[in-house]
Image: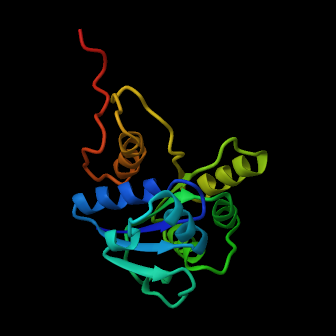
């Protein structure tokens, strides 16, 4: 399985890191695209961590000639984590001149899985409408929400819940979080 992971300019670099680690642990080949704002935010949020080194292949967001920019390149899915509201808007409206927005278009036109993990709070009405547009076009919206039933102990545990849900949506078995088993009697 090949998954494109895009990282855009919203707080949440830990999402990208944990997602890439989870995909690697599942034996998935990863293709990474980072926007320029995402690179700057990652330096602030994860000093000393080279997110690029966690991917199998990485591309410049300006490289519209990259293999993943074409529907003839057979990747399976794309996850944008975190997804900025700018990228959400571009995704919802089919516009933008970056590799990230082009790969979103490829996913939607080729009926490939697309998961956006928007990182903003609160959402404006425009943000919510953009989410509806992406959903109507065939994408999935997965805000990185918190869950406490798995008894998180670290920030990574909280993030792993959201990343594990993304892998679940792709049908990838993972142990990033403890699945709900109901109340035990």
| Residue 150 against residue 93 in the figure, above or below | above
User: Residue furthest toward the right?
Assistant: 125
Task: Give the residue displayed 56% in from the left and 69% down from the top.
Answer: 40
Task: Give the residue displayed 49% in from the left and 67% down from the top.
Answer: 6
Across the whole image, how many numbered discs are drawn on residues?
0
Task: Give the residue displayed 73% in from the left and 50% down from the top.
Answer: 129
Residue 8, horizontal then vertical, whole percent: 56, 65
Q: Where on the picture, by quarter, is residue 122? A: top right
The way the protein has been coloured in the rendering is: rainbow
| Residue 53 against residue 170 in the figure, above or below | below
Task: Give the residue displayed 56% in from the left and 63% down from the top.
Answer: 41
Classify residue 90 as left or right of residue 111. Answer: right
Q: Where on the picture, by quarter, is residue 170? A: bottom left
Pick whichever, 126 or 159, lies toward us: 159
Q: Where on the picture, by quarter, is residue 105? A: bottom right
Residue 66, horizontal then vertical, whole percent: 47, 87
């Amino acid at each position: 399985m090949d998954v494109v992971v895009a990282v855009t300019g919203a707080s949440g670099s830990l999402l990208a890191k944990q997602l890439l680690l989870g995909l690697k642990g599942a034996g998935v080949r990863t293709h990474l695209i980072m926007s320029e704002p995402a690179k700057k935010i990652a330096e602030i949020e994860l000093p000393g961590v080279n997110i690029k080194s966690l991917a199998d292949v990485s591309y410049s967001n300006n490289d519209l000639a990259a293999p993943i920019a074409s529907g003839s390149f057979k990747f399976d899915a794309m996850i944008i984590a975190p997804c900025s509201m700018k990228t959400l808007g571009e995704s919802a409206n089919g516009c933008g001149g970056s590799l990230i927005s082009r790969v979103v278009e490829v996913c939607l036109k080729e009926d490939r899985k697309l998961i956006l993990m928007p990182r903003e709070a609160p959402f404006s009405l425009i943000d919510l409408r953009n989410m509806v547009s992406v959903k109507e076009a065939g994408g999935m919206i997965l805000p990185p929400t918190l869950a406490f039933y798995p008894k998180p102990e670290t920030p990574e545990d909280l993030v792993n819940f959201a990343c594990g849900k993304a892998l679940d949506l792709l049908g990838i078995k993972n142990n990033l979080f403890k699945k709900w088993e109901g109340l035990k009697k």
